[in-house]
Amino acid sequence: MPIIYSTSHDGIDWAALKAALAADSFDNGRTALQMELSFRASFRCVYAFDEAEVVGTARALSDGVCNAYIVDMWTHSKHRRRGIGRRMMDLLCESLAGQHVYLFTDDQEAFYAECGFAPRGVGLERIVGRWLRDDSK
């Protein structure tokens, strides 16, 4: 069965996606609801499906004019090295024409270089308040 790509949030089982990310050691601690809110608030998202299972995600945060940032780029480990991540990046970047697109990676520089990204500057971070504040509790 071929991998199907979608930019729609329709049909995403957020609890199942959260569980898949955790099982694949790619969980940053968000609840399923927080993950859904994060993805829905994004400029654009791409999902890769193997039948009904989400096996890849990528999303862009953007001002829609000149700056974008890519986050939550994930391909399930059992599906890697099949072009899925590259296709998601291409689909994501199609909507970012004319923009400076930035991302951060700890260990995938070669992959992103193959996607056309080049090292630039130094990434810095700051957490404001408590990480992953959950107002639902």
Image (cartoon, helix red, strand yellow):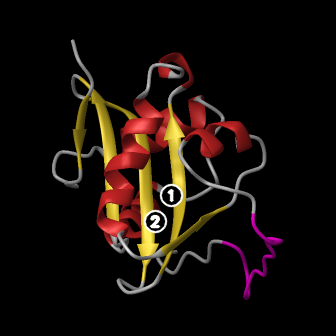
Q: Please say if the residues under marks 2 and 1 sit with CB atoms less than 8 Å apart.
A: yes
At 43% from the left edge and 65% from the top edge, which residue is drawn?
60
User: Furthest-top residue in view?
Assistant: 1
Q: Which residue is mark 1?
A: 31
At 34% from the left edge and 72% from the top edge, which residue is drawn?
43
Q: Main secondary structure of the magenta part?
A: loop
Q: Does the magenta segment cover residue 75?
A: no
Q: Amino acid at mark 1?
A: Thr
Query: Looking at the picture, does residue 38 appear above or below residue 24?
Result: below
- Asked which secondary structure carries label 2, the reply is helix
Q: Does the magenta segment cover residue 127?
A: yes
At 73% from the left edge and 80% from the top edge, which residue is drawn?
130
Residue 11: x %, y % from top left: 17, 45
Residue 129: x %, y % from top left: 73, 87
Q: Nearer the viewer, residue 86 or 72?
A: 86
Magenta residue span: 120-131
Distance between the Cα atoms at labels 2 and 1?
Answer: 5 Å
Query: Looking at the picture, does residue 78 appear above or below residue 76?
Result: above
Q: Amino acid at mark 2?
A: Gln
Residue 104: x %, y % from top left: 69, 60
Q: Which residue is mark 2?
A: 34
